[in-house]
Amino acid sequence: MINNIPRVRFAPSPTGYLHVGGLRTALYNYLFARNSGGKFILRIEDTDRNRYIPGAIENLISTLKWAEIDYDEGPDIGGENGPYLQSERLDIYKEHADILIKNKKAYYCFCSAERLASLREEQQKQNIQTKYDKHCLNLSDETISQNLSKGLPHVVRLNVEPGKIIKFRDHIREEVEFSSEVVDDQVLIKSDKYPTYHLANVVDDHLMKITHVIRGEEWLSSTPKHIILYEAFGWEIPVFAHLPLLLNADRSKLSKRQGDVAVEDYRNKGYLKEALINFVALLGWTAGDDKEYYDIDELISKFSLDRVNKSGAVFNIEKLNWLNEEHLRRKSDAELLQMLRTELSESKYSTLTYTDEYLISVIRVMKERVSFIKEILEKGYYFFEEPSSYEEAVVKKRWNNQSAEILKLYGENIRAINSPTKEDYENILKNTAAQFNTGNGDVIHPLRLAVSGIGGGPGIFDILYIIGREKTLNRINTIIEKLNK
RNA sequence: GGCGCGUUCGUCUAGUGGCUUAGGACGCCGCCCUCUCAAGGCGGAGAUCACGGGUUCGACUCCCGUACGCGCUACCA
């Protein structure tokens, strides 16, 4: 084992979208692999035909691609240990189940759903643990082959030996111990011939040479079953690492009711993959220093399973928002330009054309003021259209009976200059204020209102310079008309 | 009900027996900067380290118990 490189996997079920918890599990596996020079495998656990949703696999893959969590082997790219879709490995599971049956580690069970239900009901009534009563364990070979040849529906169950202690070391939780008395004779092969998670997972992890099983805490309780399977096959047991759960604000398991859980929801809202990854990485892991902002390369170099927490973490959107701002501000103008163009093409401004130069100047003055690129179109709408109204409170506070005259004069003064620079706008403004014997603010605020319609935003001279002389003059005329009715 | 796991500021966390009057980050509040809004800088409030025992000269840190939370308890994963 020492010479083997680490091999880890992310093994989601195609039941819809990629959950943010799944993203974190995938990320930790990915970080671990990249950090240790190991391999990361994507395997699709589509053994439940009832829950299968068409398109879910494609969706999972495209979401992982968006997040740039790339894998070395997987259903769409192949690899030496495929196929990577469990539904294409049915023969393998049958073959392994047969080995178990031959060695008395598993057995056929012909019990009906009704019997199972009443058994469970009875156990619940008696307040004892619900588990299978090994009713079919000692069926004679004759009975079994008769039943089989009659085509009776059946499953294959794990034969759990009672009275044993199953002990294993979880990388995150240290020693964990279960009595085999509490381990059910789990169904391994369902009556539809598909394997259950437990069999498929163990067989595949072994065949795919997985060295570290990094998965959510919800699997901790079924790990004894997996240990029993590894031992029944005589296989080496991988290292287990059960990750703490992601929680809602009320500390219940993160669910759809209380907010968005699909990665694509966050993507659609405009969150950057860098921010989501940074955020989710910090939910349950810390490098131990005071750093909060990480790019993927730093995450890879610093990640260690040793520093993963034990307790669940509340998914707190405030911090995600902050990280989104941080990542946004460190993006290059070129990247932001591309993102802004995408937003524009999907907005009501899609028919308008703007030069790269124009948009970059808008980006430069707006990026410190937004959390999302799309907010540039909202908070900085006046770079794309004229204000159609003026914010009431600002009018009240900043517009007085002198304002129209001041603006008029300012307009005349800038009209005299052909293509004013930012400094020209500023110098003229100071002159205008002096002419009126008033403070700069008495010019600035009405002017800001005229060109933007609102009270806040980038420096006024930046705005004027970006929108240009003609638009500035038009907007001055408009506000004078509208407010001095 | 049974079994398992967990429990440090509102939230994410640092802390591995004395360095701790428990540190950082987000959020919140204030000040500075300033034409506004942000950003940035500075500062503040915020945690009897779930509770109770024990071990120890000394415990947030080790042990036991209790409480609470969560997970599992399917021919779902």
Image (spheres, coloured by chain):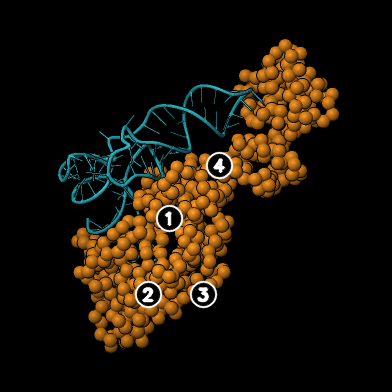
Chain colours: A orange, B cyan
Q: Is residue A409 above or below residue A313?
A: above
Compared across the picture, whether A433 is left or right of A392 comes to right
| Mark 4 or 2, closer to the camera | 4
Mark 2 vs mark 1: which is more N-terminal?
A: 2
- What chain does mark 2 sit on? A
- Determine which residue is flagged by label 2: A189
Cα separation, mark 4 vs mark 3, equals: 40 Å
Which labelled disc corresponds to residue A80? 3
Is the C-beta separation of discs 4 and 3 under 8 Å? no
Q: Are marks 4 and 2 on the same chain?
A: yes
* Any part of residue A340 in sight: no
Q: Residue at x 53, y 52 (%)?
A: A296
Name the subunit of mark 1: A
In the picture of the structure, the residue carrying the numbered disc 1 is A304
In the rendered image, residue A260, in percent from the top left (x then y), is placed at: 49, 48
How far apart are the two marked residues, 4 and 2, measured between alpha carbons? 50 Å
> What is the number of the mark on residue A326?
4
Query: Which residue does the image show at 41% across and 60% down from the upper left?
Result: A215
Q: Earlier in the sequence, mark 4 or mark 3?
A: 3
**Callout 4–callout 1 Cβ contact below 8 Å:** no
* Marks 4 and 1, the one that precedes in the sequence: 1
Residue A433 x %, y %: 73, 16
Other residues around mark 1 within 10 Å, as few (<14) / some (14–19) / many (≥20): some
